[in-house]
Image (cartoon, helix red, strand yellow):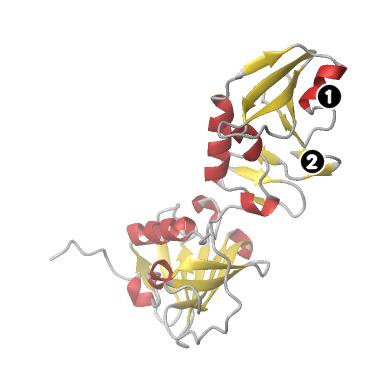
Amino acid sequence: VRTGAQERWTLERRAKDGWTQTLAPPFEADAVFVRRLLHAYANLRAREFSHDGPQVRAARGLDAPVLEARFTPSEGAPVTLRFAAPDEGPAATVWALREEGDTQELVRVEARALTLLQQDREALRSRRLLSFEQAQVARISMTPADGSPAFALVRVPGTGSEAWRIEGARTGPVDRYRAAGLLWTLTSLRADPRPPSDGEPGPVRQGLREVRVLGEGDRALGRFRIGPEDPEAPGLRQVELAGGRRVLVEAARLEALPTSPEALLGPLSDGP
């Protein structure tokens, strides 16, 4: 997607259904946004067709498009859309020049087709705190905020993907369902859309201070540091991600993470 000579953002599909925004610096794209965008365009229908020509394009505002988008399928020719400024009115529409191979046509479509593409690059960023394939994880290191010794959940080498143990002040085997639950929890953590405030935060006295996820050979897969509750957003804690970006995360989700080896050791309870 570009406006004039400036390229705004580029999305590329990666393995499975994930997407990456590839312009520097690259980052994981928000899956919800991409699904909404693809669904909207899969169901996009022309409201009107127009005959073509230089004068017609100028009259439609397409001599100076406000935005250009290029869709490249895995098979077939790319489709390029060049948009004019939207019409005014309650049922706003926009004229676009659609190009596919040697075919060019002028179409009028709903203005949402344009506004979906006018997102700032940062708005496309995934709100997931961590992004990794669970099978890649060899170690999850956790540092409590109360000064207790750090501990780690470690995949036992040579025993397949199901066996885990705790390393730290206490050691022992970890039920595979507890390990799977922690992995799922970490990948499900999401940042709040609101930015952190500039107010002075309070001290951190509970929960974890830091979580690090490592692969084989201690390859870094992700990290975040948990700060205090945001002074202007009750129930949300400040979190610093790898690279220094700060976000807000629901405090209850963070405080539910295990803060000691005892929280992971031993079999799961069958209930009362």
Instruction: Identify which residue, 84 or 222, lies in the foreground.
Output: 84
> Do residues under tags 1 and 2 come within 8 Å of each other at their CB atoms?
no
Q: Earlier in the sequence, mark 1 or mark 2?
A: 2
Task: Please name whichever residue, 29 or 131, is drawn nearer the observer in this view of the structure.
Answer: 29
Q: Which mark is residue 58?
A: 1
Residue 86 seen in the current view: yes
Which type of secondary structure does the marked residue at label 1 adopt?
helix
Distance from Cα at disc 1 to Cα at disc 2: 18 Å
Residue 116 disc label: none
Write the residue at 55% across / 71% down. 239
Nearest the viewer among 210 and 270 is 210
Nearer to the camera, 141 or 237: 237
Q: Residue 48 appears at what percent x and percent y?
A: 64, 16
Which quarter of the figure is the N terminus placed in? top right
Q: Is 68 placed above or below 229 here?
A: above
Q: Secondary structure at mark 2?
A: strand
Q: Is residue 95 left or right of residue 7?
A: left
Residue 230 in the image: x percent, y percent?
51, 76
- Could you tell me which quadrant the C terminus lies in? bottom left
At x 42%, y 78%, the residue is 207
> What kind of residue is marked 1?
Ala
Question: For the view shown, which residue lies furthest in the front direction?
Answer: 89
Question: Quadrant of the rendered structure where residue 270 is?
Answer: bottom left
Of badges 1 and 2, the one in the foreground is 1
Are there few (<14), some (14-19), or many (20+) residues within 10 Å of tag 1?
few
Is residue 78 in sight in this rendering?
no
Q: Amino acid at mark 2?
A: Thr
> Residue tagged by mark 2?
3
Displayed quadrant of residue 255: bottom left
10 Å crowding of disc 2: few (<14), some (14-19), many (20+): some
